[in-house]
Structures are given as structure tokens and as C-alpha cells.
Image: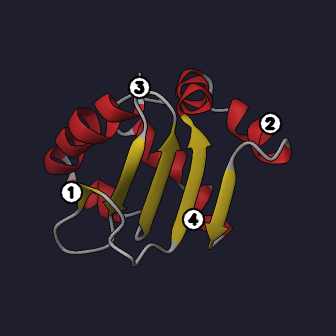
Amino acid sequence: MDAKTLFNEKLPQLIEKEPDKARELDAIYLFNITGDNGGTWTVDVKSESPSIKEGDSGNAECSIEVTSEDFEAMMKDPQVGMQLYFQGKLKVSGNPMLATKLQQLFQMGGLG
């Protein structure tokens, strides 16, 4: 699944359907996906009304940067994320411990 489909369609539906479960992550993420089908999204699963918005809200606690090709590989196989991180292809800034919780978000709808 490409990043645009995930962040513009799938995750917003999941968050709307299960806001309490989404809020368990208690964080604000910034995703910067480069390349084809990429973009920048702020995923707020901390506020009372969890949301996903295009662009950088400026208040992310954890930022993730990766190419769209590598992002799609991670969506198919979550284990790829650690490999990409250690290869320097997945960049995490801010609180890196929050990045470890992301799999919970993607698993909400069987996405990862």
C-alpha cells in the first residue's frame, strides 16, 4: 500500500472508527515520505479527536523520514523497518521510543 492511500484514506477511517484505541499511542507523529506517492503528514493520536492531516503541524514528538519505496516495503514486512533504520534509510528524530509504537497503529486495521 502506498503512503498516499494509507494516510489519506485507510488510517483516517481506522482512527475515526476506533479513536480510543488510536489514542493509546498518545503521540504526535510527522511522516515525511519522499519520492513517488510520497508526501508529508501529521498523525495526531494524542488529542481528544485523533486526526491525520497533510503537512507539518510543527508539533510532532517523533518524525519519520523514508522513501516511498522503502515505506511500502515496511508495510509489507514490518521487520524491514529495523533493517532500514540501521542502514540509515529510515530516519527517526524526536523521541525514538514513540517510533516503536507505530506498529500498533498499523495493526489496528490489519495494515502491518
Q: Are marks 4 and 1 in contact (CB under 8 Å)?
A: no
Q: Are marks 2 and 4 in contact (CB under 8 Å)?
A: no
Identify residue for label 1: 19
Q: Which mark is residue 83?
A: 2
Q: Name the residue located 49 percent from the left edge and 51 percent from the top edge.
A: 32
Quarter of the rendering occupied by the N terminus: top left
Residue type marked 3: Asp
Residue type marked 2: Gln
Q: Name the residue located 51 percent from the left edge and 51 percent from the top edge.
A: 102
Establish if 24 lies above or below 58.
above
- Return the disc, 2 or 4, that comes first in the chain's sequence: 2
- Return the disc, 4 or 1, that comes first in the chain's sequence: 1
Quick one: SS at disc 3? Answer: loop
Q: Which mark is residue 2?
A: 3
Identify residue for label 4: 98
Front label number (2 vs 3) = 3
Front label number (1 vs 2) = 2
Q: CA distance from mark 4 to mark 3?
A: 22 Å
Quick one: SS at disc 1? Answer: helix
- Return the disc, 4 or 3, that comes first in the chain's sequence: 3
Establish if 88 lies above or below 61.
above
- Bin the neighbour count of mark 3 within 10 Å (Cα to Cα): few under 14, some 14-19, many 20 and up: some
- Return the disc, 2 or 3, that comes first in the chain's sequence: 3
Quadrant hosting residue 71: top right
Q: CA distance from mark 4 to mark 1?
A: 18 Å
Residue type marked 1: Pro
